[in-house]
């Protein structure tokens, strides 16, 4: 059989709006025609009126390669990404070794491209070895596929080092993503500092440990400029600070995770290590503030902080569990449940916070684009009425540490295409 040259996606609803048809040229990976179908093509998919979104973009994942390939690899992480509807992800630098040199960043990028299921952008560390002492060669790394720098997992606490990092990042036009946590205030902490932690006898991580760093960084961004991005905003106070910053015209962006939008520290009552995460699950008033902030644009994007860990690090006493949760395969369903199902937002909003805005912040030219003729066919097909139950075992990730085990969702990614090539299909599983 000769290689197919065209693909038709018939009976599809872009952004959940009117049904139409798409013709894709597989050689260029570009959308060639819309609407006048149903098209005939070398390959034809009847999309059954499902919702079509621009391929999702995740600014924050941990694919654990190099070093912890027992928990995730670039390949298994790409599978999980494609299954979750993603066509581009940014994988954090806290690997072993840390991504602090160009050849390491280059290797991550090349592996992702060779595997071909998702564009995997390497995040470079801000400081060598994540030690918080010496800056990496930001300029050199920036020439080797690194568009974002972060010590995620750790905070750049030293204000003078942070100032220098902001200035270098600005000079090289790269994003600086901060994990805001004053480590002196969170030493030994495993849960949000509040009533639940007190009742359960867990050491608490106060909101101020995040907010004090956020406040400082926003003021630095005001004075020194650059493209500052806040990782995993988790508190009501952080939202207030971001709102203040946006009112001042300070050009900072921020992300929120699906778990901080949906879950609270009430989940900790069973001491299940799968609910340990950093920053910790907070309280109702925080989730309410985070939801409002995403709706009104104070928070720009949803990012999963997909953090695979093996059962030896999760099925242990809560205090000994490593922080982190899987996120790639459940994020679209969580966002649908929190915003679309109750009628708080539509699919245009989902496209904005999970694809367009992250692509814009990262200055990706071929992602988060409109579904239109001449645009790259990076696409995600979603069935909004497909009831399913989350199960760690059934996930494409190597690890299975999902906090949503046994939870029911109604939206499911049914197919993903990267530049016209199908990277996931539910019916072919
Ligand atoms: O929960 C987390 N896990 N938060 C982080 O910042 C790091 C991540 C990890 O690498 O496991
Ligand atoms: Zn992270």
Image (spheres, rainbow, N blue to C red):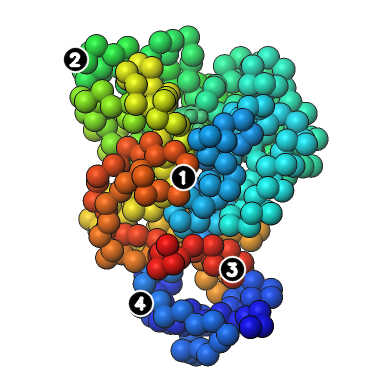
- Image quadrant occupied by the N terminus: bottom right
Q: Nearer the viewer, residue 313 or 225?
A: 313
Q: Earlier in the sequence, mark 3 or mark 4?
A: 4
| Residue with the mark numbered 4 | 49
Q: Position of residue 154 (x, y in %)?
A: 54, 22
Q: Nearer the viewer, residue 16 or 315?
A: 315
The tag on residue 199 is 2
Q: Residue at x 37, y 49 (%)?
A: 394
Residue 284 can be seen in this image = yes
Report, in whole angstroms, how far the alpha carbon at label 1 lies from the one at label 4.
29 Å
Q: Nearer the viewer, mark 3 or mark 4?
A: 3
Categorize mark 3 by other alpha carbons within 10 Å: few (<14), some (14-19), many (20+).
some
Q: Position of residue 147 (x, y in %)?
A: 68, 42
| Residue with the mark numbered 3 | 421
| Residue with the mark numbered 1 | 397
Report, in whole angstroms, how far the alpha carbon at label 3 lies from the one at label 2.
52 Å
- Asked if labels 4 and 1 touch by Cβ distance under 8 angstroms, the answer is no
Categorize mark 1 by other alpha carbons within 10 Å: few (<14), some (14-19), many (20+).
many
Q: Residue at x 69, y 54 (%)?
A: 114
Residue 298 can be seen in this image = no
């Amino acid at each position: 059989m000769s290689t197919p040259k065209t693909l038709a996606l018939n009976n599809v609803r872009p952004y959940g709006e009117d049904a139409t048809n798409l013709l894709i040229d597989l050689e260029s990976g570009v959308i060639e025609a819309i609407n006048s179908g149903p098209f005939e093509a070398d390959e034809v998919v009847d999309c059954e009126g499902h919702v079509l979104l621009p391929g999702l973009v995740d600014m924050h994942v941990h694919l654990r390669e190099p070093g912890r390939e027992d928990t995730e690899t670039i390949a298994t992480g790409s599978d999980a990404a494609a299954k979750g509807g993603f066509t581009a992800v940014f994988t954090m630098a806290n690997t072993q070794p840390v991504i602090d040199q160009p050849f390491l960043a280059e290797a991550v990028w090349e592996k992702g491209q060779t595997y071909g299921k998702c564009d995997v952008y390497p995040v470079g560390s801000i400081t060598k070895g994540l030690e918080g002492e010496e800056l990496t060669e930001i300029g050199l790394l920036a020439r080797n596929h690194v568009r974002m720098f972060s010590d995620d997992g750790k905070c750049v606490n030293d204000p003078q080092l942070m100032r220098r990092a902001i200035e270098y990042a600005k000079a090289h036009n790269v994003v600086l993503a901060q994990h805001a946590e004053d480590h002196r205030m969170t030493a030994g902490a495993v849960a949000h500092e509040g009533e639940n932690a007190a009742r359960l006898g867990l050491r608490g991580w106060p909101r101020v440990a995040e907010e004090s760093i956020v406040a400082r960084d926003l003021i630095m961004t005001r004075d020194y400029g650059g493209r500052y991005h806040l990782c995993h905003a988790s508190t009501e106070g952080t939202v207030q600070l971001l709102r203040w910053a946006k009112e001042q015209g300070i050009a900072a962006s921020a992300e929120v995770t699906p778990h901080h939008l949906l879950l609270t520290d009430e989940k900790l009552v069973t001491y299940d290590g799968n609910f340990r995460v950093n920053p910790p699950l907070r309280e109702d008033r925080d989730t309410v503030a985070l939801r409002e902030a995403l709706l009104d644009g104070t928070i720009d994007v949803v990012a999963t902080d997909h953090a695979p860990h093996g059962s030896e690090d999760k099925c242990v006493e809560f205090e000994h569990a490593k922080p982190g949760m899987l996120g790639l395969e459940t994020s679209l369903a969580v966002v649908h449940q929190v915003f679309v199902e109750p009628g708080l937002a539509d699919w245009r909003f989902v496209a904005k916070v999970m694809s367009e805005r992250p692509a814009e912040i990262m200055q990706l030219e071929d992602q988060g684009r409109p579904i239109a003729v001449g645009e790259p066919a990076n696409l995600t097909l979603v069935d909004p009425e497909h009831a399913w139950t989350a199960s760690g075992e059934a996930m494409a990730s190597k690890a299975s540490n999902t906090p949503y085990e046994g939870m029911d969702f109604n939206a499911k990614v049914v197919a993903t295409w990267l530049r016209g090539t199908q990277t996931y299909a539910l019916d072919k599983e």
